[in-house]
Image: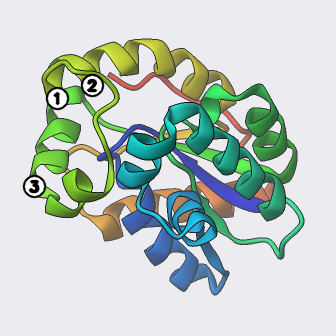
Amino acid sequence: MHIVLIGYRGSGKSAVGRRLAERLRMPFYDTDDLVKIKTGRSIRAIVEERGWPYFRRVECEVIGELAALQDGVIATGGGAVLDEGNRHILKRRGLVIWLAADVATMVHRMREDVRDEEQRPPLSRDNMLREAEEVLGQRTPIYRRLADSCVDTAGKNIDEIVDEVSHFLEEMRSGKKEATCREIP
């Protein structure tokens, strides 16, 4: 099975996914990177030129293609879970880990990541904090329903998060743990 990382921008999906894939000796797939490769454009350019619906269609194609590939670690775009077909594919073909953090932590991480602003357009015209609160209000119930496990990434470095995910995976493999998603503050 794939190990699928879901969560909002700034939750650490790409960085954690790369490190987790290295540790597990599995391929790493980042759906945002694959969309950029497939279109030859940055996400910002795709959205500015063709709109969010076009981006989401290409994202769905990428997720469908990943389902047929060798098992690996998949870092999804934050909104990939909005599509019911994506949710079905990800759940059927993967163990889903929700990387979460409080809004202030994620906004801080997004502000620190210069690449984020260059590559990803805002989802609304509101300020970043208001946008994150609004979008998370809509997505959190979806993340929670889809997730087999949740990891609060606030105040943790990449290795600590990878350790926590790895520990969960080991417990799942040994039958000591059932897939559950505890509440994230």
Residue at the (18%, 18%) spot, across then down: 126
Residue 40, percent from left and from top = 52, 70
Which numbered circle lies on residue 3?
A: none
**Residue 80 in view here:** yes
**Labels 3 & 2 near each other (Cβ < 8 A):** no
Q: Quadrant of residue 171?
A: bottom right
Q: Which residue is mark 2?
A: 132
In the displayed structure, 28 sits above or below 155; it is below
Q: CA distance from mark 3 to mark 1?
A: 13 Å
Between 58 and 130, the one nearer to me in the picture: 58
- Disc 2, disc 1: CB below 8 Å? yes
105 above or below 117?
above
- Would residue 176 be seen by someone viewing this image from the given angle? no
Task: Left or right? Give the position of 144 relative to 96.
Answer: left
The image shows residue 144 at horizontal and vertical percentages of 57, 24
Label 2 and label 1: CA atoms lie apart by 6 Å
